Amino acid sequence: MEKKDGRVRVCVDYRDPNKANPKDNFPLPHIDVLVDNTTRHTLFSFMDGFSGYNQIRMAKKDKLKTTFTTMWGTFCYRVIPFGLKNAGATYQRAMVTLFHDMMHKEVEVYVDDMIAKSKEGKDHLVNLKRLPIA
C-alpha cells in the first residue's frame, strides 16, 4: 500500500502467529496510577519514544515467524514489528529495565510515552540529564 508521500506502507497480518504464541503477562502500568504519581510535581517533560519497538531486535529463532512476501521479494523483520501480540509488554519491560532506578520518582513510563517530572524547578535539568537516552 502506498502512503500519500509515496513511501510504501507494509501491512502484515499477524493473527495466526499471535494465536500461536503465549501471551507475555508483563504488566502495563495503570494510567490512573501514573497520573496520581505526577501530583505535587511542578515541572514535566513529555517524551514520545516514537517507533520504539523498532529499537528492539528480534531473537534470531523468531525472525522467520515474521516472514512476509511482497511484489519485491520475501522479507522478515530484524526488529519487533508493530502488530505482534507481545510487542507492548516487551517494550515496557525494556523501559522498566532502562529506567528502573528512576521509575515513580523522576520518571513515569507507559510503553513508549515517558514523563520526566520534578518537584522543584531547579531539579528538572538535573533529572533530565540522568535519563539514559540519546
Image: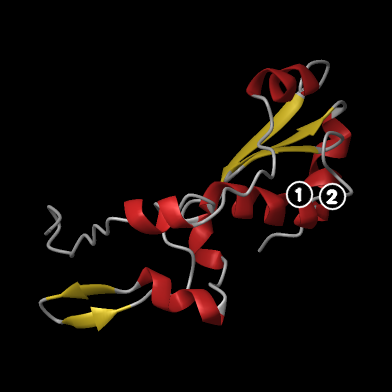
Residue 22 is left or right of residue 134, and the answer is left
User: Would you call the spot at circle 1 few (<14 residues within 10 Å), some (14-19), or many (20 or more)?
Assistant: some
Task: Please state, as top left, top right, bottom left or bottom right, where the N terminus lies in the image.
Answer: bottom left
The C terminus lies in quadrant: bottom right
- For the residues labelled 2 and 1, say whether their Cβ atoms are less than 8 Å apart: yes
Q: Secondary structure at mark 2?
A: loop
69 shown above or below 38:
below
Q: Amino acid at mark 1?
A: Val
Determine whether, in the image, residue 133 is placed left or right of residue 129: left
Q: Looking at the image, which residue is at 24% across and 57% down?
A: 11
Q: Position of residue 87 (x, y in %)?
A: 52, 53
- Toward which corner of the image does residue 33 lie, by quadrant? top right
Instruction: Write down the residue under mark 1.
Output: 96
Tell me the kind of residue under disc 2.
Answer: His
Counting every numbered tag in the picture gives 2
Residue on which disc 2 sits: 100
Q: For numbered disc 1, what is the local secondary structure?
A: helix
- Residue sitting at 41 percent across and 78 percent down? 64
Between 85 and 107, the residue placed more toward the observer is: 85
Above or below for 132 versus 63: above
In the rendered image, residue 63, in percent from the top left (x then y), is placed at: 45, 76
Disc assigned to residue 70: none
Disc 2 packing (10 Å; few <14; some 14–19; many ≥20): few
Does 2 sit left or right of 55 as displayed? Answer: left
Identify the residue at horizontal 70%, vertical 52% (top origin).
Answer: 93
